[in-house]
Image (spheres, rainbow, N blue to C red):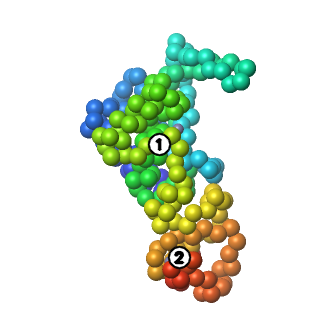
């Protein structure tokens, strides 16, 4: 799975190069690493920032509290949730691209700069980067059963007929032959 993630990440980097966004050896971006998240999360992914350039910051107000927020970081640790890797490649790449943008200067939020990059990439590379993803839609597109509890399933089952992937918290392995796919009525197999 880690291998698939690296392959898709490298594809994203190459595509960015083709529209003149150089991510590798770019001083204003710094270093990026990417891995699968260890913990299950509802989020598609996240980008943990490190080593801020303390010259660049803004003050943001949340209610009455003011906090200093840095705008440029030299280290970025992208983590992608495991369940995302079950989705279609173009959706995985949308997620990766979204997190790569967070590594750019002034992009550690979904503000103006983030939007500028995401629409540039959407237009020129045919992506569909959004602020948040639409899980229900993404699951449907990938022929996966949509479940809010996706991040703590125990069993992953595939329909032999339509290929839909079904997640279950509880499941009697022995009686798998008596279960049927809710979408097409096909028989099921544990994977
Ligand atoms: Zn984001
Ligand atoms: Zn089916």
Residue 28's image quarter? top left
Give the residue at mark 1: 130
**Label 1 lies in ligand 1 vicinity (Cβ under 8 Å):** no
> Label 1's element?
loop
In the displayed structure, does residue 17 sit left or right of residue 159? left
Image position, residue 129 (x, y; %): 43, 43
Inter-mark Cα distance, 1 to 2: 29 Å
Q: Residue furthest top?
A: 55
Label 2 CB, ligand 2: below 8 Å?
Answer: yes
Above or below — where is 89 with respect to 56?
below
Residue 130 visible, this orientation: yes
Q: How many marks?
A: 2
Give the farthest residue toward the bottom.
178
Q: Quadrant of the C terminus?
A: bottom right
Q: Which residue lies furthest to the left in this view?
A: 18
Compared to residue 179, the image places residue 2 above or below, namely above
Judged left or right of residue 151, residue 72 is left
Q: Which residue is drawn at 59% across and 47% down?
A: 43
Q: Where is residue 38 in the image (x, y as percent from the top left)?
A: 61, 49
When the figure is inspected, residue 151 is found, relative to residue 80, above or below; the finding is: below
Q: Residue at x 35, y 35 (%)?
A: 120
Q: Position of residue 168 (x, y in %)?
A: 64, 69
Mark closer to the chain start, 1 or 2? 1
Crowdedness near tag 2: few (<14), some (14–19) or many (≥20) residues, C-alpha within 10 Å:
few
């Amino acid at each position: 799975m880690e291998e698939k993630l690296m392959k898709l990440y490298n594809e994203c980097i190459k595509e960015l190069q083709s529209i003149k966004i150089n991510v590798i050896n770019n001083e204003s971006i710094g270093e990026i690493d990417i891995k699968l998240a260890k913990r299950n999360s509802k989020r598609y992914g996240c980008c943990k920032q490190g080593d801020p350039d303390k010259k660049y910051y803004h003050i943001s107000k949340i209610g009455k509290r003011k906090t200093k927020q840095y705008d440029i970081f030299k280290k970025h640790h992208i983590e992608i949730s495991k369940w995302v890797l079950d989705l279609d490649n173009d959706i995985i790449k949308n997620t990766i691209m979204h997190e790569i943008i967070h590594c750019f200067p002034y992009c550690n939020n979904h503000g103006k700069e983030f939007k500028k990059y995401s629409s540039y990439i959407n237009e020129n590379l045919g992506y569909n980067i959004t602020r948040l993803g639409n899980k229900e839609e993404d699951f449907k597109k990938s022929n996966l059963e949509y479940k809010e509890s996706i991040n703590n399933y125990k069993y992953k089952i595939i329909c032999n007929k339509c290929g839909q992937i079904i997640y279950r918290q509880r499941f009697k392995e022995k009686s798998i032959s008596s279960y049927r796919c809710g979408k097409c009525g096909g028989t099921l197999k544990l994977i």
